[in-house]
Image (spheres, grey):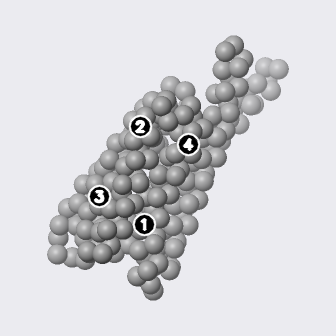
Amino acid sequence: MTHYQLDLVRADRERWLKSYYFIRAAFSVAWVVAAFVLAPSSAVIAGALLVLYPAWDAAANFADARRSGGLKQSRTQALNVVVSLVTTVAVLIALQMSMNRVLGVFGAWAILSGLLQLGTAIRRWKSFGAQWAMVLSGGQSALAGGFFIVQASTPAVPSIANVAGYAAVGALYFLVSAIWLTVSAWRQHARRAQLG
């Protein structure tokens, strides 16, 4: 590939990444709203939302990996797809037992997926902006997972609200990343306009 072609590929991936982060933020906000507005009135809706969350993460990571060079090139995301799919099944099983078990599953998932997201962000650091927010998000996810596991082992019965707080913080990080990439693109465009 020529230098010009590489620049085009990079620009296309950056556009995709910006859209991807906005989509992830929007989904998480919608999920949090549903968790607080709809879930309290229906255990079925709460259960469906809890299953949907890791399933969406698997689908989103798969789509991003495909658009970012393929699953072989994006091994942390390929692993994240597998981890999130296994978590989806584990949540379905845990829902038949107790909410403490569900929160424990979410804790283990938050640790693993957070570390894998951290790995993806570090890999992308040289090529794309806004990865500092994804690094923070991955690290905080892993810490939150540990907290979930501790909470799950107490006698108190958790609810979907415990997970909703985690999802809200994730939405914020995705939104910050999307805005950061948007502002960076505007600045680059303005520089090029001044030079050309």
Q: Which residue is mark 4?
A: 64
Residue 159 pos. (x, y %) = 34, 75
Mark 3 highlights which residue?
107
Neighbour class for label 2 at 10 Å: few (<14), some, many (≥20)?
many
* Sooner in the amino-acid sequence: mark 4 or mark 3: 4
Q: Which quarter of the image is occupied by the C terminus?
A: top right
From the image, tell me which residue sits under label 1. 51
**Residue 12 against residue 6 in the figure, above or below:** below
Among the two numbered marks 2 and 3 on one chain, the one whose residue lies closer to the N terminus: 2
From the viewer's side, name the closer residue of 62 and 193.
Answer: 62
| Disc assigned to residue 76 | 2
Mark before the other along the chain sequence, 3 or 1: 1
**Mark 1 or mark 2, which has the lower sequence index?**
1
Cα gap from disc 1 to disc 2, whole angstroms = 22 Å
Along the line of sight, the residue nearer the viewer: 139 or 119: 119
Comparing labels 2 and 3, the label whose residue is closer to the camera: 2
At a point 41% along the width and 37% down the height, the residue shown is 76
Quadrant hosting residue 186: top right
Question: Is 56 on the left-hand or right-hand side of 163?
Answer: right
Hey, what amino acid is under mark 4?
Asp
Task: State the separation of the CA atoms marked 1 and 4.
Answer: 21 Å
> Three-letter amino acid code at disc 1?
Val
